[in-house]
Amino acid sequence: MIVRWAVVSLLQARLRMLASSLAVAAAFTLVFMFRAVWEGETRQLATYLERAGADVWVMQAGVSNVHMASSFVGRAKRREVESVEGVRAAAAVLYLNSMVTFSGQRWFCYIVGIEPGQRLGAPWAMAEGRSQVQPGEVVVPGVLARVSGVGLGGSVKVGDRDLLVVGLSEETFSATNPVVFVHREDLADLLWLEGYDSCLLVQANEDTAPGELALRIEAEVDAVEAMTTEELVESDTALARQMGTQIIALMTGICAALATLLVGFTMYVHTARLGTELAVLKAMGFQRGHVYLAVVVQSSLVAASAFGLALAGTAILASLTRGLATVVAVRLTPGAVLEVAGVGALVAIVASLLLARRVASVEPATVFRT
Amino acid sequence: MSRLALGWLRLDASRSVLSVAGIAAVLAVMLLLQGVKAGLATQLRSVALDRGADLIAVQPGVSNIVGARSVLPQLARGEVEAVAGVLAAEPMTTLPLIHERDGRRTPLLLLIADTTGVPRAVEEGRVLEGEGEILIDRSLARIHGLSVGEQLEIAGYSFLIVGVVEATAALWTPLAFTNYDTLIEFYFEADLADDLSAFPLLGYLLIRLDEGTESSGVREAIEAGVPAVDVYGPEQIADNDERLGRTMLGAVLDLLIGIAWVVGLTVVGLFMFTAAEGRRRDIGVLKAIGFPARMIVGGVLAEALIVVLVAAPAGVALARVGAELVGRFAPLYLIEPLRPVSVTLAVAGLLAFSTAGSVGPLAIVRGLEPTEVFRR
């Protein structure tokens, strides 16, 4: 009965409840968007690793990341790796995190050096032009070409040299680390580096499991680290996530505190209006615990409706972001939804507790005063 | 009207306090987010500006310290020092590394220099003196629970932590400092590679000029006489590093800040709407006993104004406390929330939205029958 009363009394103030739910939903939306943008960008970082075509990545010993790391593997290692049983094909890439200038605008990119005819590690989907590069040429992400206005036949500056844009690739853009492809020798010159690759991309025979092959390569080739693509993707995304974990947690905490305050405020205004009814409930013999239950139910309903509105709002914002701000990747995971749901439940309970004293102080005699 | 507003605010002090707290919290969130972006720029700039150089020589085509790999030929140092007006050209190298402890990996930028370039003051411990020593940023110490006297292990090599320095992170990556003797030892003893020729020894030259020497003239003379280097002022490199941060994270942060502003201002409007709507009965009573509509509207607006004006300093203080707490518990992130432009814009936005939110319910009240307010 008390639950029914809680729901009915809440529905009687529909306009106020809608306004309150929208306000709380706005705070939740902010949390969702933080997570969605961070997750989107983090996942985008791993796209090159996932799509480069390798089953196993071989890097300098002790290096287990591409993101925020550098790796140097002697050129002779390629032959050693190719001779390991279970290797179908191997190719080398040289890479560097550095600035690339697109018509005066500088972008921090992964610059990948490949050789002509190389498939592993080369662009896998093209919007326009060709995926193979000769010395002096470059393939850039199509998104970056659109944003900067540098198209096929234009030039971009990598280090101190101008390179001709011969291809626009797809799926290679992220706001934090777009991938551009240059000829291996151009990058080696830029790095003043002869006789080295950054990593080897290995394809396994059909009957060889990548994990098994990685172990075999580490056992047979000195001073290298071999990881399956799955492991490397996991390692890189975990590193990127760790870099932002604290700030995301802080922002989530701040927004959760704001949401708590908003739910608390809503319930405060609501219970202030219902003072007489609460007094009647107490006069009728309902215990303090029943009245608390009513407040918890109402807070939970406000938080739950806000959560639903926030999910809808986030979906709209995410699709708007994809349409308008093509440079930012947005991805909302079920895990993030569940975490925010947990925060929402906490918000409802804490907001209810804030009102406990007020509810407890309602005197049954109040009913006779008005 | 102000008396009416103050009367309403006093009538239910708890609700007024909650309104002020809510709006202050919204303002704090908006300022903190803006502060993340401002702090990121400050951190990036300080990498070049804190090196103590009058000019910085880099590999041709490179114009950053953060996010760049610069390699210079060993002979470049002598050639630069031979240019008139150059007092000294101290070597500096940067090396991106990853420290792993207890399954947690943190990327760090190791900055190697002997005299100019390394911090001369530490928050804890002492400055670099001998081989095998390292200074680490406070954020790295906190993330991994490291302290002075402990070992920092990277690629199988153990550095001895002799000091902890403050505010030397950039792009959410802590900096660490060591000297060249340690770098050589690290290259030979760490599990890096069979052949070390790929690893940089000289990346930058931190140039100090003779007193009273004009830097632009020396810069031109170096670039003309030493083709193996490009030369920039620390301010230019700081600008480039800041631009790098804007390019990498600007779109992401701007999107989040934009959403936070829209959300924040909407929340304030809805907050004031709820507050004013909750006063509907009081307003109806005033209307029933003959208060002029002008006075009621004025009272509602004055109430919104008072709430925002009280909430604004509270929100600014809350943002400042929040930034300090972040600095204490997560020193990797510098938050600078109190830029005057941000504060002014945020307060103006709050005033506009809270006013709009408060006035909304008056339309409902206008249609309210005086007798209706006496019904339950």
Image (tube, rainbow, N blue to C red):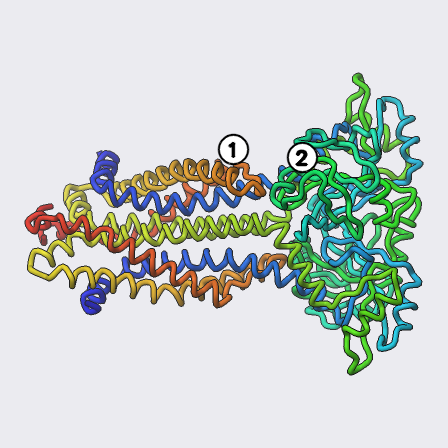
User: Which residue type carries mark 2?
Assistant: Thr
Dot 1 amino acid type: Pro
Identify whether B213 is placed above or below B290.
below
Mark 2 chain: A
User: Can you tell which mark lies on residue A291?
Assistant: none
| Picture quadrant where residue B207 is located | bottom right
Q: Farthest residue toward the bottom?
A: B212
Name the spot of residue B217 as percent of width and height, x first: 80, 74
Which chain does the residue under circle 1 lie in? Answer: A
Question: In front here: A323 or A97?
Answer: A323
Marks 1/2: CA–CA distance: 20 Å
The residue closer to the viewer here, A157 or A5, is A157
Q: Is residue B245 left or right of residue A285?
A: right
- Residue corresponding to mark 1: A334
Asked whether the viewer can see residue A341, the reply is: no
Total marks in image: 2
> Foreground: A104 or B228?
A104
Which residue has dot 2 on it?
A47
